[in-house]
Image (cartoon, grey):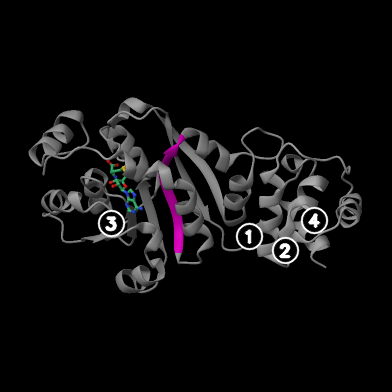
Amino acid sequence: MADLANPQNTLAVLRKYGFTAQKKYGQNFLIDANVLEKIISGAQITQDDCVLEIGPGIGTMTQYLAEAAGRVIAVEIDRHLLPMLEDMLSSYDNVTVIHEDILKVDIDRLAEEYHGGRPLKVVANLPYYITTPVILKLLQGGAPIESVTVMVQKEVAQRMESGPGTKDYGALSLAVQYYAKPEILTIVSAGCFLPRPNVDSAVIRLRKCDTPPVEVRDDKFLFALIRAAFNQRRKTLVNALTNAADLKVSREEVCAALTDLGLPVTVRGEALSLKEFAQLADLLSQ
Ligand code: SAM
């Protein structure tokens, strides 16, 4: 089996099938074997694992995953890639390719069907145009998932990992950190892809928490609060929250809750930790 993780072999396959990478599907194929090895070792895959790969492309990473894991389920939206995938993966009997949009896939059902309902490990070089909805589906959707090891745009990885008071901190940081422990494993330069994207990338591993790191009575309200706080990032928290119609909280209530927490009424959302947001949510949803 030819290793596809280099420019010559990737180009040869694309030419053979007359395939042109589609921007609308975020198709930037990995052509660097070192990066692939870092992803596979970072994902800590064993023969007991069932891996869900999002967007196998021409099957470059899928081949590495098939060697390391017991089973691989690869979900690809672009039907033009299916004949290539069939050829590239023909020597592996532990790979199933599913032609579907990952945002529509029932991941619970996949875990049930392919892994007896046990948690899956997700590994992907994600299409960047849907990074946030995919990450939120994987974390908030409640499907059995142990970890998510993915290539994303470098800035997005930094947002997932950052804490209060930094410019990258926001709703995505808080959502990710409520469900998982994020860790950037490596930065990847644009030259490791074909075609070359305009931005650098990073591999990040999100280890799902068994229980969230903070307790909160109503997590839906917590996330509505966080969304409102960062929708109007430059405003004080009091203004951002009272302007959000769906929260139905008054200026007096927000000021009183902030004072209870020992925070100034002029504070902005970007200064609050996840724990402080959870405490604020409990006070305001009473
Ligand atoms: N895994 C390959 C690699 O590393 O070379 C390809 C990665 S490429 C960045 C993203 C892949 O995701 C493409 O194959 C693209 O067609 C696929 N894709 C895009 N949107 C998708 C979606 N909604 N559901 C499933 N696959 C998708």
- In contact (CB < 8 Å): disc 3 and disc 4: no
**Is 221 included in the stretch rendered in magenta?**
no
The answer to whether marks 3 and 1 mark residues whose Cβ atoms lie closer than 8 Å is: no
Task: Say what amino acid the circle numbered 2 marks.
Answer: Val
* Along the line of sight, the residue nearer the viewer: 115 or 153: 153
Residue 216 - label: 2
Residue 134 screen position, x and y as percent: 45, 53
List the residue tagged with mark 4.
280
Asked if the residue under mark 3 is in contact with the one under mark 2, i.e. CB atoms within 8 Å, the reply is no
Instruction: Say which residue label 3 marks.
Output: 74
Q: Quadrant of residue 189?
A: top left
Which region is colored magenta?
145-153
Q: Residues within 10 Å of mark 1 (few under 14, many from 20)?
A: few
Side (left or right) of 68 relative to 127: left
Task: Give left or right: position of 43 versus 76.
Answer: right
Label 1 with label 2: CB-CB less than 8 Å: yes
Q: Can you identify the residue that label 1 sits on? A: 212
